[in-house]
Amino acid sequence: MKHLLQISDLSCHDVEQLLERALFFKHSMDVPIYKKHTVAHLFYENSTRTRVSFELAAKNLSMNVVNLDVHTSAEQKGEVIEDTIKTLASMGVSMVVIRHQQDKLPLALAKSIQDEVHIINAGDGRHAHPSQALLDIMTILAHKPRLDRLKIAIVGDVYHSRVANSFQALCSLLGVGELVMVAPKIWQPKTVLFGQVSDSLKEGLKDADVVMCLRVQRERLSQLEHIDETFYRTHFAITAQSLSHARPDAIVMHPGPINRGIEIDDVMADGAQSVIRQQVSHGVYMRMAILESLCQ
Ligand code: CP
């Protein structure tokens, strides 16, 4: 792997290797040392989980880490992002983890910067969040090893969700049995890569093995895309009542951050079926596997 930009660039073999290494890191104290590598984090959008877990992953692998504060960097004086990255490369940075509001910017950067650094997409606009999809599949496999027999339901604002996009691509690649995306009409995807779309939470959750709840992303909604929160809660929230349609052993996931009491109730987010905290833990191991794969 040269970069990690989007799931569609990966083969099944790539994903299997990443899962294998992430599991190794989860269970082993014998972690290799990659002292020669320096990772820079460029986060133009807010983040807790992705930024910190990439940092911890790099440190666990003995890499150097630079957290560039993009709000005080030379970009505020007019430097373009390509020059910022080339400047970092001149100082020995070999990997750049980037989160940006612009769809597909990491792909454009990987093209323009060529071989100078490895680009890792940590979320670009509505387009992709590949490391999230990989840690999500790792979490599902920890509970439900037969992906081909699963029904997975994604619930919420699928239209604006880079998490849902990358997850669809990964489900398609790995041959997930059934994927249903449940969303109010206005938040349904315009194009579907894999799975079906429904506006019925009851139908979508019926016999589901995995329920992935998405955040209501207020910051991405145009004026015409806002939905009354009471309506949303009534028809689309993950509650004890709505989850009763899924299988009794269904796991509940959420990429975070959570809007408690809006898309999901506390009792579901923190309950026995929730694997949300495990998703976060797996994020560190999967990001170790991603960083290591770019050192080869
Ligand atoms: N899931 C996710 O990307 O969370 P952060 O925005 O906190 O990184």
Image (spheres, grey):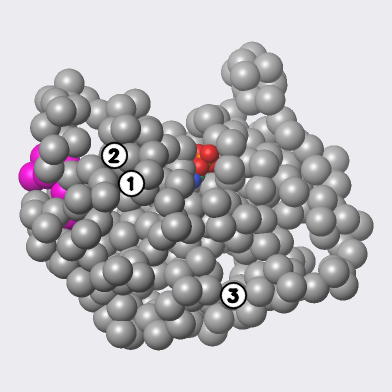
Q: Of discs 2 and 3, which sits in the foreground?
A: 2
Task: Indicate which disc, 2 or 3, sits on the residue closer to the N terminus.
Answer: 3
Q: Name the residue under label 1.
A: 214
* Amino acid type, mark 1: Leu
Q: Which residue is drawn at 59% across and 29% down?
A: 80
Q: What stretch is highlighted in magenta?
A: 180-187
Q: Name the residue under label 2.
A: 263
Q: Residues within 10 Å of mark 3 (few under 14, many from 20)?
A: many
Image quarter (top left, top right, bottom left or bottom right) of the N terminus: bottom right
Task: Indicate which disc, 1 or 2, sits on the residue closer to the N terminus.
Answer: 1
Q: Is mark 3 within 8 Å of ligand 1?
A: no
Contact (CB < 8 A) between labels 1 and 2? yes
Lateral position of residue 217 relative to residue 141, left or right: left
Contact (CB < 8 A) between labels 3 and 1? no
Q: Where is residue 228 in the image (x, y as percent from the top left)?
A: 14, 26
Q: Residue at x 66, y 70 (%)?
A: 22
Q: Residues within 10 Å of mark 2 (few under 14, many from 20)?
A: many
